[in-house]
Image (cartoon, rainbow, N blue to C red):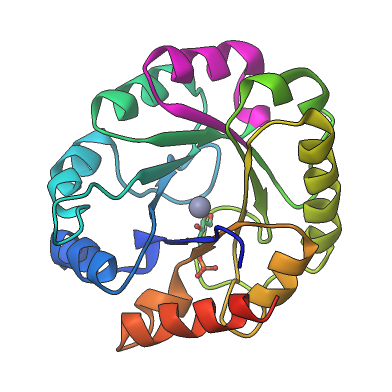
């Protein structure tokens, strides 16, 4: 089996008990914590900022103390100052939407200069062209399989073609770049997404919307084992 990662999105967690939710989902087997940052400007919703990220950081730890990476997905415009603030708040990976940055290459450098891994995110109707110019500098490609802004939406099938195209670009680059998919992922479609070439899976409502987080994550891993 490939080195797959499951990244539960705390957007779907109980916001009144976020620390406990992060701890519980880590205990249930989360590989990363996906942190959706929305600004009511780039997307029509508003979530949490760097203060919440640093407050949750101590909870993103396995029982033996190993830190679990915080995967920050910025849906904000502009990008650079908030990216730096999230780096200071303990993010491990920071991804942004190229449409939200006036200077995509500069934003990538701004993230990397703070010691974080950098990712670019593609909306359902955004072409991958910008990769022609930044693939050598990034650590992660995030393909949106819903329009950003809300959890609980249905998976958009054209994302599968985009995942395939992104996988080809990663192979051609020869670089070790994670290929993550975000939106509408569940145990019953995760294998299809993995077959298209993804190795990292965001899931919000499919995990936090259910009573037993471990059962959901285990079901996803079982589905991935069949790929
Ligand atoms: C949407 C967010 C997603 C969202 C996924 O803007 O980027 O991470 O939380 O939620 P589900 O898994 O419920 O589609
Ligand atoms: Zn996200």
Q: Is residue 141 visible?
A: yes
Q: What's the residue at 33%, 80% (across, down)? A: 213
Q: With respect to residue 129, does 204 lie above or below?
A: below
Residue 183: which quarter of the image? bottom right
> In the rendered structure, does residue 108 fall within the stretch colored magenta?
yes
Front-lying residue, 149 or 68 = 68
Front-lying residue, 152 or 206 = 206
| Magenta span | 98-120
Q: With respect to residue 2, does 71 lie above or below?
A: above
Q: What's the residue at 52%, 79% (across, down)? A: 220
Query: In which quadrant of the rendered image does the N terminus lie?
Result: bottom right
> How far across and down, in percent of the image, does residue 97 sit?
61, 34
Q: Is residue 93 left or right of residue 192?
A: left
> How far across and down, in percent of the image, does residue 56 sit?
18, 48
Front-lying residue, 62 or 121 = 62
Q: What's the residue at 45%, 51% (across, down)? A: 45
> How far across and down, in percent of the image, does residue 101 sit?
60, 22
Q: With respect to residue 211, does 196 lie above or below?
A: above
> How far across and down, in percent of the image, does residue 176 sit?
63, 36
Front-lying residue, 44 or 191 = 191
Q: Is residue 159 left or right of residue 148?
A: right
Q: What's the residue at 57%, 34% (across, down)? A: 119
Residue 9: which quarter of the image? bottom left
Q: How many marks?
A: 0
Query: In which quadrant of the rendered image does the C terminus lie?
Result: bottom right
Q: Is residue 103 visible?
A: no
């Amino acid at each position: 089996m490939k080195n797959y990662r499951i990244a539960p999105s705390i957007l779907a967690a109980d916001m009144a008990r976020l620390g406990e939710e992060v701890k519980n989902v880590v205990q249930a087997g989360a590989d990363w914590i996906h942190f959706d940052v929305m600004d009511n400007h780039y997307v029509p919703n508003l979530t949490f900022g760097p203060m919440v990220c640093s407050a949750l950081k101590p909870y993103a730890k396995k029982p033996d103390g190993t830190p679990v990476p915080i995967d920050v997905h910025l849906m904000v415009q502009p990008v650079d100052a908030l990216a730096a603030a999230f780096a200071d708040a303990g993010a491990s990976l920071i991804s942004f939407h190229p449409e939200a940055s006036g200077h995509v290459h500069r934003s990538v450098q701004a993230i990397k200069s703070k010691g974080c891994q950098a990712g670019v995110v593609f909306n359902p109707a955004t072409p991958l062209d910008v990769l022609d110019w930044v693939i050598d500098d990034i650590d992660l490609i995030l393909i949106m399989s819903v329009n950003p802004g809300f959890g609980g939406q249905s998976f958009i099938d054209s994302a599968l073609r985009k995942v395939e195209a992104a996988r080809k670009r990663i192979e051609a680059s020869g670089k070790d770049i994670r290929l993550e998919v975000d939106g509408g992922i569940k145990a019953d479609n995760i294998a299809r997404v993995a077959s298209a070439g993804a190795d990292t899976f965001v899931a919000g409502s499919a995990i936090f919307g259910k009573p037993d987080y471990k059962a959901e994550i285990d079901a996803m891993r079982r589905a991935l084992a069949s790929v």
